Image: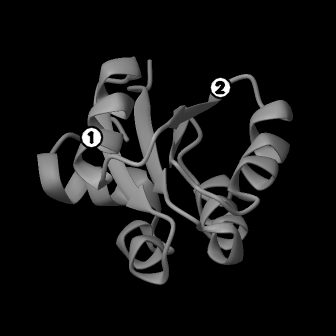
Amino acid sequence: MEALVTVIVTAYNAADKLEECLNSVVAQSYKNLEVHIIDDGSKDNTFQIANEYVSARSNWFYHYQENSGVSVARNVGIDNAKGDYIAFIDADPLGQLILGNAGIGADLRQITGVDGF
């Protein structure tokens, strides 16, 4: 059985980049994922974009918090995570590069040495 990977996406006023970020998660070759989008008090339409993805997928979740910073947002994701592994991605271009085209499974193989991905 494949390990479940929890992807925690933090977003603050990320409407202009969130869709591209979430599409990079959808495009991953490793599919045993749950995704938690943590909205850190956005004032733009981050919710509407996140809701499109969450509404279409049973393993995607949206969480809103008053603006408290990325560390608190990540902790909300960790508190809700069910995965065997956790991957963090911020809704910005750097975050997309962290996941990259190789996919989460390839990254976890390199980091952990575990071959089950």
**Mark 1 burial class by Cα count in 10 Å: few <14, some 14-19, many 20+:** some
Image quadrant occupied by the N terminus: top left
- Measured as percent of width and height from the top left, residue 55 is found at 84, 32
51 vs 72, nearest the viewer: 72
Percent of width and height locating residue 103? 47, 61
User: Could you tell me residue 83's position as x and y percent?
Assistant: 37, 24
- Lateral position of residue 108 relative to residue 55, left or right: left
- Residue at 51% over, 74% down: 101
Q: CA distance from mark 2 to mark 1?
A: 22 Å
Q: Quadrant of residue 21?
A: bottom right
Q: Of circles 2 and 1, which is in front?
A: 1
- Picture residue at 52% right of the left edge, 48% below the top: 41
Write down the residue under mark 1: 72
Under mark 1, the amino acid is Val
- Callout 1 secondary element: helix
Q: Nearer the viewer, residue 96 or 37?
A: 37
Between residue 84 and residue 51, name the one nearer to us.
51
SS for callout 2: loop
Question: Where does label 2 land, which residue?
Answer: 59
